[in-house]
Amino acid sequence: MSDNSSNQPPGRFLGGDSNRKNPEPGGLTGESQETAPLTETEVKADRAAKKADRKARSDKSFLGHPRGLMTLFSVEMWERFSYLGFQAILVLYLSDAVANGGLGYSEDVASSVVAAYGALLYLLSIVGAWISDRMTGTHHAVLWGAIVIAGGHILMGIPTEWATWGGLGLIIIGTGLLKPNINSMVGELYDKGDERRDAGFSIYYAGINIGAFAGPLVAGWLGQTYFWHAGFMAAAVGMVLGVIQYLVGSRHLAGRSRGQKIRRNFQMDATMWRLIGLVVVVIAIAVAFTVAQDDVLTSLVDIITALTIIVPVIFFVWMYRSPKVTPTERGNLLPYLLLLFALVLYNLLYFQSGNTLNLLALNGVDNSVFGFDYPSTWYISLAAIVEIIMGPVLAWLWIKMGSKQPHVAAKVGIGAVFGGIGFLFVALGASITPGGALMSGVWLVICYIFLGMGDLTLQTSGMSATTKLAPRAFASQTMALWFAAMALAQGIQAQIVQLYELENSVTYFGIQGLVVLGYGLLLVALTPYLKKRMHSVA
């Protein structure tokens, strides 16, 4: 299962286009420009950095691509291995009895905590993108993000509750630094006109899905077969390997010149202090989790849900009311809301692989085939298999159809339909399973196949539409709005998952499946209208 935030085109989320003139000082747009003459040392450093960038981009030693692509491929593969590996067992560990090595929380609280954790991660991704664009450059952001993530996984390998919450806090902060910036580093390996760029991203995304496939298999097996912290340590080993790979191969990466310029021109401003405040809030919440009881945990989750609602609303209203947005661009934003809503609804389903679907697989599914018993967490790897196989097929299909391919609104709607169908199959399987019996694993397999297809269709099309519908003055911030919508999906999910019980599986999965399926069909039906309203979008 690939992480949604990873299926995105190259580009920045905050900080604007570095080629813009007259950037907005102290805000979220623009990149600081040099106002003072450079010293001789700085001039020499710039020349050396530009030379190193040219060398990195001209290299063809990795399958005809720059050698730095192999470094980023490996780092992202291990990051996804560690992230999806530990996430596969997190809710099981939180809800398992203390006598069995778990933390003993109720399943509804454990599920909502997992969702709230994901919401904080996406909120911090917005901050991480800004830090890279305004403070550090991509190299330093990714390096420190990887180190902090590794530290978080190592902490989670320690069998104490305080280490669990502290580890989660570090993983949130580190992933917020790494995820929105490592994709941009892939783009930095290629000049704008380099025909290898798209193929390079395809290779890079293969690394993402390989890690997403292997993580739940390895960490899930270790955690469920031996003890939970064995799975967490496997995730830690994967991330440490990723850090080592990055340190060894960093000399082959590009983007040094831009990074030097960013670090040289960084100045503390009001926005920086606000973002520091947001990070402090996240750390404070992580600390509060270490001493919280179930009722306090629920209150903390409610606060996180409120944050995920407030942030995207502020983002959108700020953008929509800006005088920098033209009337045509403002007209594009309203239909774009319909696509964002589809993203939120779909991910309400997709992200439940880490909690309710995981608990269903553990307690309500027959996890055996031909006499072989397998860990319930292995189902999570299925979505990654689907995306590995079907990604090239879907890309070929769109190229083959050319101008006859569906409009982007229809593609997003079709993706939502796939997700709704996946949940309806789970509800169907639960409804025909006799009371007290275990549901066949085939129903979950079908569900994950549809979720993988939905993710592939909706995410790629939605990201593409985001880059096209974004107002020119807010090109990067519109991608930040996409991240905020992902956080919103997790925040709402943190409330919904509390309603899940094994006994109400038919109602729980059925209602959600019908709602998302219905909205997907509505988008498809509205496509002719949206096509007229969306300018410059095919």
Image (spheres, grey):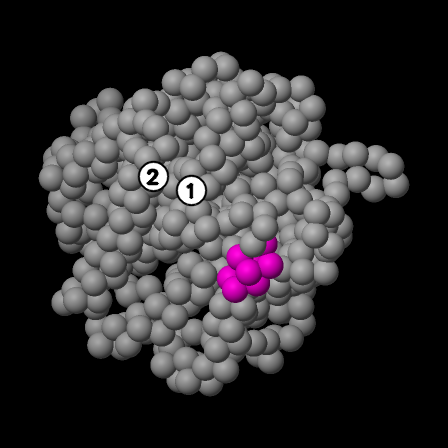
Question: At which x and y percent is residue 461?
Answer: 51, 64
Which residue type does callout 1 highlight? Ser
Q: Of all residues shown, which one is farthest toward the right? A: 370
Task: Decide which of 497, 256 is in the foreground and name it.
Answer: 497
Quadrant housing residue 423 = bottom right
Task: Please tell me which residue is depicted at 30% across the width and 33% down the height of the picture.
Answer: 296
Residue, disc 2: 298
Looking at the image, which residue is at 22% across and 77% down? Answer: 327
**Whole-percent x, y for residue 441 in the image:** 74, 48
| Residues packed near mark 2 inside 10 Å, few (<14), some (14 to 19) or many (20 plus) | many
Disc 1 target residue: 112
Q: Please give the name of the residue rendered at 48% of the width and 24% of the height, measured from the top-left corner.
A: 103
Report the number of discs. 2
**Residue 260: x and y, percent?**
30, 31
**Residue 205 in view in this figure:** no
| Magenta region, residue range | 505-512
The disc, 1 or 2, on the residue closer to the chain's N-terminal end is 1
